[in-house]
Amino acid sequence: MATNHRLDPNVDTVHWGYFDAQLPARLEVESGDTVVVDTVSGWPDVAPDEPYAPAHHEIVARLKPQPGPHILTGPIAVRGAVPGDALEVRVKAIELTADWGWNVIRPLRGTLPEDFPNAEKRVIRSIARR
């Protein structure tokens, strides 16, 4: 029988800035289970006036980015799966937990570096908050 799980972001369930197959699973599930994963995104100093969750502040205070900018929740393991197995993951929904977001452009980086020579920070608010 399938089970429902939840994986929330906190200092024990996230890592900052990299993918690594050697990371221990933060949650282990059976095939067919449903998992709700929550996330946080980056540094509060990018948008200091926005309402960050207390767990987000703790993550930023205790963990340091290495080497990339993204905070990743997980990984999640499927019991019985081994390297080389193909896993089917179905995304049932994506729900926003905030009515704002942010974007940072680091100059001369990324896929089109020549198109973005200047550093920029943007806070994107929902239409209802503008």
Image (tube, helix red, strand yellow):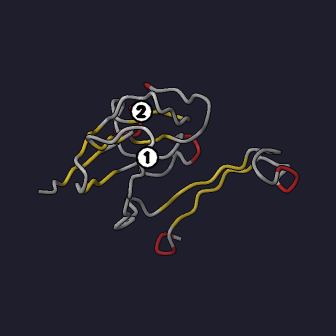
Q: Amino acid at mark 1?
A: Val
- In the image, residue 130 sits, relative to residue 73, either above or below, namely below
| Image-quadrant location for residue 18 | top right
Tell me the quarter of the image containing the N terminus: bottom left
Looking at the image, which is closer to me, 83 or 130?
A: 83
Q: Residue 128 in the image: x percent, y percent?
A: 46, 74
Give the structural element (helix, strand or loop) at label 1. Answer: loop
Q: CA distance from mark 2 to mark 1?
A: 9 Å
- In the image, residue 32 sits, relative to residue 64, either above or below, namely below
Looking at the image, which is closer to me, 33 or 44?
A: 33
Residue at point 46%, 27% (across, down): 63
Residue at point 77%, 52% (across, down): 111
Q: Amino acid at mark 2?
A: Ile
* Disc number placed over residue 98 in the picture, else none: none
Kindly identify which residue carries mark 1.
40
Q: Residue 4 in the image: x percent, y percent?
A: 18, 54
Q: How many marks?
A: 2
Kindly identify which residue carries mark 2.
59
